[in-house]
Image (spheres, helix red, strand yellow):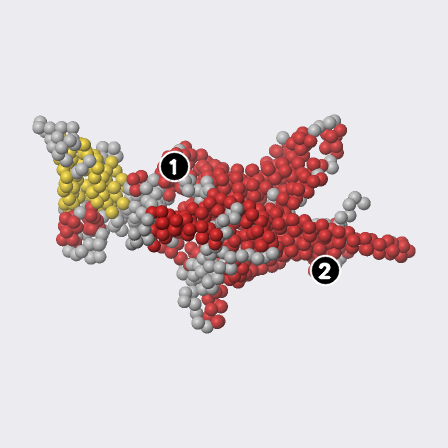
């Protein structure tokens, strides 16, 4: 290329930049609207499902009727009271309880109220569940469990992510080696979910070897000193975290390795090799850089994935995290908690997706935003 | 045809594909065997049956192959019916006045190091007014005959050795101490403390008397050992072989149907969307995004808790929620590429309608890519079913591997050392998962041009 030609191109590039900013703005505006629609529809669908389209109301009405009749029978056991009066008492108590739970308004109206409250992040109050501190506020119930889930999911997923990306990079360098083949051979082991490995780990390390606890997050009673407490939690963390890691490790390494291999067989990498650049530079500039968006996307999705917890692994290890709270909430028909957790996840997801879209639209030259057919 | 041959030749180059294929075939064979051996209604009856079906089994007994690995041999459970099972003889001598003596004899060998928890006799008698009478004794290897008990027998009668006070007194005298498990006394060296098992041939003798014409006695000898069956038993005395065998067809059916349904439907929807373009394509993409927000496992748990735990409902919901996922995006990307091919243009030129183009020209092109995805998806669904069962949301009727794991978890199998209970279904699940994963993995490397040679 001659310098003459590039000088001529300069004004063109500038106009392209200003128009692309406009395009990006238009695209982002469109994305925001779409994401909001997605959140609204997704959350409303969850509200409908969590109430089984109003069927949960019927279940709860029956529950209330049953418990109220029992209560009244107990209250009036030793009193001479007319059957009509007793009937009235039952009906009054049922009405009161239904009013407390909001069952006196039709479900359709309530569902939109839930939606509106949920979208404003007013998660409301749980119907039956109580947080350890004694509160019925959904926000508190969820927040209380967040540290446990963040500890378990955070430690395991971060280790998993970095170890597998790092090992995958090493493997992609030594393609076809013994270790490479070993990882390929072991990757089908990821077909089994974490709780499955959890059972084996409990069997080996807790039941037979008796070196690690069966489950829970801390001994009861917990150790007095802070250091003792931390060490004790870490000891409880080993088994659930390693089952979460081991279950996904080999497939994850394999995926990243294949991904890196595809990028390292590009022509420009061959070109760089032909030029005689050293391996480190090639890896940094020609393999890692184009793969970075994918790595960041995966990392971001991993971070928001932490929120959902690992229901079954937490159940198997009796880990007091969010996943298990959701499971318990379902058992109590406590839809407020279920919907609350979903709303937060939806917001996190939408926000992350938006952020990633925005960053890529700015950074990645290959992402052509709203370019159309030119 | 040629490409299929090539593909087969290629598969042979991957040992993992062959191993995976063999495992899958073994599972299919196991499933067919299970369905033939125990027909479906029978399996349900057995699995839901209580004491009346499973009285012959001890509770929580490990499988018989435990003995192969342990130094002290545990007694094996057995049950014999007089006149039906070999060795349990029944001799009837009728007297002129209509009364008769019925003598039963059964020889068995006891050469175990541990004592059985319980031994009992099941009687079935026929009579009008006067009930028959029996006296039971046991001939031990050292030649002594231990009197166990004598009693009149009602129409249906269970005689538990350990609940007969007179037998307990006799055994306590023989052993010279209070026995916690009286049955132990029969199979122990007299006066030994702690009890030493007396190994050798035992003979059960039942002398029955009937007092009427047409009156009869039938006896069944139930020996509860410490191990039972090839798969052991659970807390309800159920033979785990029912669940181990029937778990295979259920797991395969659930895994294959879910994988097939999900991948076929998302493929068809992706093809229609890609071909139609415009608002339909946009709508499909939006639904996919909304689906990303919905909590998949939580919804399944909700359906299981609120609505129905039937495996077919769960299967339907699973498929419905899995259609609009990443797969539809991958398929769509491929279809968008294929859509531009010249042969599609040619088809359009000759006037093929949309339906024909989608089903005859678009979809067949991606089937080679679909097969590995489908096979790889199977384990996820097999484990999904097991996961729901572990959460206590398994189908209430069907015997599945996941439900056995759930039972074992609930009753603390790992704490109490009943490892067989959890390990057997786990190993079977693992084999299923590994088999499909290995096969699918190799297929992916063969069919997916992007991965070829990597």
Q: Nearer the viewer, residue B10 or B363?
A: B363
Evaluate whether residue B439 shows in this view: no
- Report if the CB atoms under discs 1 and 2 are less than 8 Å apart: no
Mark 1 → mark 2, Cα distance in angstroms: 64 Å
The residue lying furthest to the left in this view is: B97
Quadrant showing the N terminus of chain A: bottom right
Which numbered dot is residue A330? none
Q: Residues within 10 Å of mark 2 (few under 14, many from 20)?
A: few
Look at mark 2 in the image and give the residue it sits on: A281
Q: Residue at x 65, y 49 (%)?
A: A37
Look at the picture and state if B208 lies above or below B352.
below
Quadrant showing the C terminus of chain A: top right
Which numbered dot is residue B43? 1
Look at the picture and state if A354 lies above or below A224.
above
Label 2 sits on a secondary structure element that is helix
Q: Residue at x 16, y 28 (%)?
A: B214
Circle 1 or circle 2, nearest the eye:
1
* Residue A29 rendering spot, x and y as whole percentages: 72, 52
Look at the picture and state if B444 lies above or below A36.
above
Q: Quadrant of residue A122?
A: bottom right
Look at the picture and state if B50 lies above or below A207.
above
Q: Nearer the viewer, residue B363 or A114?
A: A114
* Residue B339 rendering spot, x and y as whole percentages: 71, 37
Q: Residues within 10 Å of mark 1 (few under 14, many from 20)?
A: many
């Amino acid at each position: 290329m001659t310098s003459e030609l590039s000088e001529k191109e300069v004004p063109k590039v500038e106009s392209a930049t200003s128009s692309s900013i406009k395009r990006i703005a238009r695209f982002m505006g469109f994305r925001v609207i779409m994401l909001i629609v997605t959140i609204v529809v997704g959350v409303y669908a969850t509200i409908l499902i969590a109430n089984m389209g109003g069927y949960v109301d019927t279940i709860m009405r029956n529950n209330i009727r049953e418990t109220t009749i029992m209560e009244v029978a107990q209250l009036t056991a030793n009193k001479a009271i007319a059957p009509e009066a007793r009937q009235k008492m039952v009906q009054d108590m049922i009405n009161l309880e239904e009013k407390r739970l909001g069952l006196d308004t039709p479900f359709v109206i309530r569902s939109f109220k839930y939606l509106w409250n949920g979208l404003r992040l007013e998660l409301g109050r749980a119907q039956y569940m109580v947080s350890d501190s004694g509160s019925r506020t959904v926000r508190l119930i969820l927040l209380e469990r967040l540290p446990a889930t963040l500890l378990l999911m955070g430690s395991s997923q971060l280790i998993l992510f970095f170890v597998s990306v790092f090992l995958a990079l090493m493997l992609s360098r030594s393609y076809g080696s013994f270790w490479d083949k070993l990882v390929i051979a072991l990757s089908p082991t990821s077909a089994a979910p974490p709780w499955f490995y959890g059972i084996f780990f409990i069997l080996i390390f807790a039941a037979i070897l008796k070196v690690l606890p069966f489950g829970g997050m801390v001994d009861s009673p917990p150790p007095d000193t802070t250091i003792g407490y931390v060490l004790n939690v870490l000891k409880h963390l080993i088994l659930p975290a390693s089952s979460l890691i081991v279950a996904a490790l080999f497939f994850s390494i394999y995926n990243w390795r294949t991904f890196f291999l595809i990028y390292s067989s590009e022509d420009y990498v061959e070109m760089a090799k032909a030029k005689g650049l050293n391996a480190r530079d090639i890896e940094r500039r020609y393999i890692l850089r184009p793969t970075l968006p994918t790595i960041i996307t995966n990392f971001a999705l991993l971070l928001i994935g932490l929120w959902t917890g690992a229901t079954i692994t937490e159940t198997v290890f009796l880990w007091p995290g969010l996943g298990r709270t959701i499971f318990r909430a379902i058992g109590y028909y406590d839809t407020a908690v279920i919907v609350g957790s979903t709303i937060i996840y939806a917001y996190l997801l939408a926000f992350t997706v938006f952020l990633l879209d925005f960053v890529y639209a700015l950074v990645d030259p290959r992402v052509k935003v709203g370019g159309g057919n030119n | 045809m040629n490409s299929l041959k090539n593909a087969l030749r290629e598969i042979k180059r991957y040992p993992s594909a062959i191993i995976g294929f063999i495992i899958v075939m073994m599972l299919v064979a196991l499933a067919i065997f299970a369905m033939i051996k125990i027909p479906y209604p029978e399996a349900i009856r057995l699995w839901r049956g209580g004491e009346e079906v499973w009285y012959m089994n001890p509770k929580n007994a490990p499988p018989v192959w435990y003995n192969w690995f342990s130094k002290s041999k545990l007694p094996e459970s057995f049950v014999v019916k007089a006149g039906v099972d070999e060795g349990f003889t029944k001799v009837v001598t009728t007297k002129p006045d209509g009364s008769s003596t019925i003598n039963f004899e059964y020889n068995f060998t006891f050469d175990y190091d541990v004592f059985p928890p319980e031994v009992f006799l099941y009687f079935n008698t026929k009579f009008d007014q006067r009930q028959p009478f029996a006296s039971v004794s046991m001939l031990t290897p050292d030649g002594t005959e231990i009197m166990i008990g004598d009693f009149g027998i009602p129409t249906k009668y269970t005689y538990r050795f350990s609940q007969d006070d007179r037998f307990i007194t006799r055994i306590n005298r023989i052993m010279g101490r209070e026995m916690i498990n009286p049955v132990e006394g029969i199979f122990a060296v007299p006066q030994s403390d702690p009890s030493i098992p007396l190994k050798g041939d035992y003979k059960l003798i039942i002398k029955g008397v009937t007092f009427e014409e047409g009156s009869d006695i039938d006896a069944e000898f139930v020996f509860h050992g410490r191990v039972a069956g090839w798969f052991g038993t659970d807390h309800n005395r159920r033979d785990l072989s029912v669940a181990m065998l029937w778990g295979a067809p259920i797991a395969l059916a659930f895994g294959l149907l879910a994988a097939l349904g999900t991948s076929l439907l998302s493929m068809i929807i992706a093809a229609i969307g890609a071909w139609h373009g415009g608002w339909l394509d946009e709508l499909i993409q939006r639904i996919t995004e909304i689906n990303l927000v919905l909590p998949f496992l939580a919804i399944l748990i909700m359906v299981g808790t609120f609505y129905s735990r039937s495996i077919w409902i769960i299967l339907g919901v699973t498929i419905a929620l899995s259609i609009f996922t990443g797969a539809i995006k991958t398929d769509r990307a491929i279809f968008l590429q294929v859509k531009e091919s010249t042969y599609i243009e040619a088809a359009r030129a000759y006037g093929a309608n949309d339906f024909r183009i989608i089903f005859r020209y678009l979809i067949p092109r991606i089937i080679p890519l679909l097969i590995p995805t489908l096979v790889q998806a199977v384990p996820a669904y097999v484990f999904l079913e097991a996961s729901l069962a572990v959460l206590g949301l398994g189908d209430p009727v069907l015997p599945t591997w996941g439900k056995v794991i759930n039972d074992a978890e609930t009753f603390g199998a790992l704490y109490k050392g009943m490892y067989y209970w959890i390990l057997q279904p786990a190993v079977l699940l693992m084999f299923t998962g590994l088999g499909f994963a290995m096969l699918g993995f190799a297929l992916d490397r063969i069919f997916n041009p992007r991965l070829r040679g990597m």
